Image (cartoon, rainbow, N blue to C red):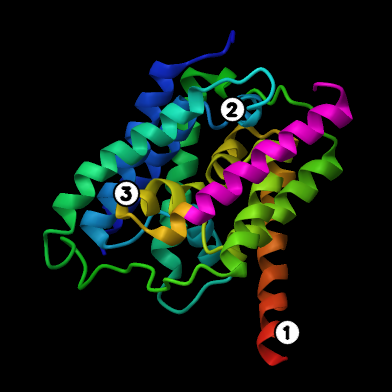
Amino acid sequence: MENFTPFASTIGGILIGLSAAIMLGANGRIAGISGIFNGVIQPQKGEFGWRALFIGGLLVGGAFMMLFTPESFAITVERAPWMVALAGLLVGFGTRLGSGCTSGHGVCGLPRFSARSLVATVSFMATGAITVFVMNLLLGGA
Amino acid sequence: MNRSIVLISGILFGIGLVLSGMTQPSKVIGFLDFFGNWDPSLAFVMGGAVLVNLVLFRFIFKRQRPLFAEKFHLPTSKDIDWRLVTGGALFGIGWGIAGFCPGPGITSLVSLQAPAFIFVIAMAAGMFLFTAFDKQLKKS
């Protein structure tokens, strides 16, 4: 396990949690990124501005980190472009069908003791693990 | 709604995603590789975030309303149905294939690498596709 980073990952997780708590406590909104992003590309009246601003914030935060640790964006897993496209389609369709992703269901739903979020989280963790297992078999341990 | 707080919250979230390693698909895939060379790091991301919110959400929900809004906008559905389970499963498959979930995919756009753009554009297409699919489903 050459890449084990419990410290950095915990700090990152705490920041993500803080961000979600700030959104909820200040503005009463769940920081679910798939839902927020969907509201930017398929806007509803009066709901576009804050969503665009939040997504903009993700990019500003990313750009800030890019200055200090560009290696944090290293895409070392080489997947064929068509596979990345298929993955994006599945993530877009699936997060809408299931009403959330890692942030909405995982980070925000679990602490609210939402049974729906627990089921969704177990569902995407399990299929994610199975997918990686199958991909490793097919690609010979990529 | 307080706009500057939305921006600050988005920035914090983005920084958190990068620090935690979520913008490295290899780390995400290493975390999902339970049966192989498992890297448990990302359990600390979810663990850290959930623990923080287990504490903070309790204080937040003690209040009648958020600081800068009329009310809390929380999901109302309680149904554990095929949509929830299948949607989660499809998302998980996509997550396992490329190692990106929505937040890290979007944040990675700043690296100007092709896979991030392919992922986010395809994700948007998937969301449009779902809207069309959902319309058809409701008609029938």
Give the side of residue B125 with respect to residue B38, left or right. Answer: right
Q: Secondary structure at mark 3?
A: helix
Which residue shows up at 72% across the image and 54% down it?
A90
Residue A103 location (% of width, % of height): 46, 48
Q: Are marks 3 and 2 in contact (CB under 8 Å)?
A: no
Q: Is residue A47 magenta?
A: no
For the residue pair B24 and B110, the one nearer the viewer reads as B24
Q: Amino acid at mark 2?
A: Phe
Which quadrant is the C terminus of chain B positioned in?
Answer: bottom right
The residue range painted magenta reads A119-142
Circle 2 crowding by C-alpha within 10 Å: few under 14, some 14–19, many from 20: many
Looking at the image, the residue that sits furthest to the left is B63
Residue A111 tag number: 3
Q: Amino acid at mark 3?
A: Pro
Residue behind mark 2: B31
Does residue B23 sit above or below B71 in this rendering? above
For discs 1 and 2, the disc positioned in front in the rendered view:
2
Q: CA distance from mark 1 to mark 3?
A: 34 Å
Residue B83 location (% of width, % of height): 61, 68
For the residue pair B72 and A1, the one nearer the viewer reads as A1
Looking at the image, the residue that sits furthest to the top is A2
Residue B136 tag number: 1
Magenta span: predominant SS is helix
Return the chain for callout 1.
B
Q: Amino acid at mark 1?
A: Gln
Q: Looking at the image, can residue B122 be seen?
A: no
